[in-house]
Image (tube, rainbow, N blue to C red):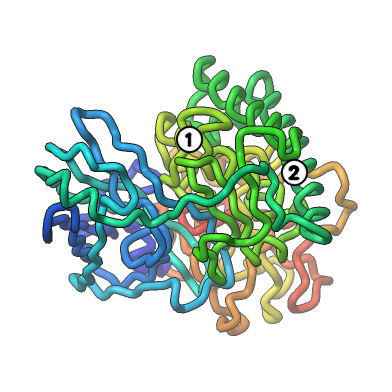
Amino acid sequence: MKITALASAILAVVHGALALPARAPALDITLSQVNNTRIKAVVKNSGSEKITFVHLNFFNDPSPVKKVSLYRNATEVEFTGIKQRLRSDGLSNEALTTLAPGATYEDEFDIASTANLTQGGPVTVRTQGFVPIAMNNKIAGYIPYSSNELELEVDAVKAVAVPASIKPLDRRTKITSSCTGDRAAVLNTALRNAASIAGKAANAASSGSSALFAEYFKSTSGNIRSAVAARLKAVASEASLNGGGSTTYYCSDPYGYCDSNVLAYTLPSTNEVVNCELFYTLQEVTNDCHGQDQATTIIHEFTHAPGVYPPGTEDLGYGYSAATALSANNALNNADSYALFANAVYLNCQGQTGGQTMWDGNSQPGQTAPGTQTMWDGNSQPGQTEPGTQTMWDGNSQPGQTEPGTQTMWDGNSQPGQTEPGTQTMWDGNSQPGQTEPCTQTMWDGSSEPGQTEPDAHTTWGNFYQA
């Protein structure tokens, strides 16, 4: 079975059961000091294939986002910039960077613009995490990045002279005057939905399915379940207070950091949340597992705010693939893990990684539809179903209807018979060219027309590429 080197290397990273290739896909970051608190980052594609990734919330983002972490005496220095939630599809080309193997680009920024370094002295700078990969302007997975550790001796006088990226605003009201008319109505509905969904997720974290919880937080420890439940309960409480809580909410952007790719952002240092124009194009509540909507965007943003539940979360893994690849400790500190878990509880998405396919217009009954292969977990025998590939009934669908969140979208380029990007799977060591990997067949039912979804034909593709 054909699979690109990049896809196989990435799948090896995700599943961990395979040896890591010599040049697995990754970005290497080299940090150096330009002048006092001004830093240069050189981003290098250390893999063997060209990659396209989202540089928002990363190096080359012009907004005051968290590009590095700063430590003084092993304690992290508070970040005073913004944390953005990005759209997962329809990304503009301006949000993307493509690097050939070995290629680099540079980004310079001043760490004193998003942190209080006025006391000067020794500061340690480093960064690591995951950056989203894009296919056809849609987040399709992630690759890791990491940097060297840079030791600085900060000149306090020079640090004081660096202007802060965020200028203080008058925050006398909790829901600001930007929230009037239709936008006030939208926000009130979104807050009610967020309160309800976060509350249900808090209950599920406390006493719901351990398998579902472990899917998103990689643990069934009582302490971790309690911590997740407590944060989600605090989010539900904040949303239900409708302006009487710890956050200040803006229905339009007072700082000018929204663009066509940003749904909303949070200023953790001041507990401010800002809706961007794109927020108002989202559904109130999505029917798609791992989809984005207004309610879970609020949940995502409220977890960033330390006034809701301290400390605020980070953006360590964005989207389903990256979030579910985090360790338990990192998932506990990742905003999207909470939003995705809340969505999964609401829609009963356990084990559902998406990936239902369409008839390609050529397959005959009994033939396999292109692009439906799934990963072997290393244990299943021929004829067995791969764990986690069942699509749960949502309690509403009728026979022949598609379960929410299971479609694999056409990328706008593939022709009938071609595989949709991101649907490749690992060779099981036995199959010959042209054979299908065990347990992965999606059959044509003999009735569907091109473009229709095969009834009851749910399958999953390698979970790296599922955002």
Q: Which quarter of the rendered picture does the N terminus lie within?
A: bottom left
x and y percent of residue 175 in the render? Answer: 70, 46
Amino acid on which the number 1 mark rests in the picture? Gly
Please give the residue where the numbered disc 1 appears in the rendered image.
Answer: 312
- Tell me residue 113's x, y (percent): 31, 54
Comes first in the chain, label 1 or label 2: 2
Give percent across and percent down for residue 126: 22, 45
Residue farthest to the top? 222
Which percent across, then down, holds residue 263? Answer: 60, 60
> Label 2 sits on what residue type?
Leu
Left or right: residue 116 compared with residue 217 = left
Q: Does 454 sit above or below residue 464?
A: below
Which sits in the foreground, 200 or 436? 200
Left-right relation of 227 to 56: right
Q: Name the residue under label 2.
A: 191
Other-residue count near label 1 (Cα within 10 Å), few / some / many at <14 / 14–19 / ≥20: many
Q: Quadrant of residue 75?
A: top left
Name the residue located 85 percent from the left edge and 42 percent from the top edge: 395
Residue ID at (50%, 21%): 224
Q: Please name the residue shown 41% across and 45% down the image.
A: 316
Q: Which residue is more in the foreground, 354 or 364?
A: 354
**In what element is the residue under mark 2?**
helix
In the picture, the disc for residue 408 is: none
Q: Residue at x 43, y 54 (%)?
A: 166
Label 1 vs label 2: CA separation?
Answer: 19 Å
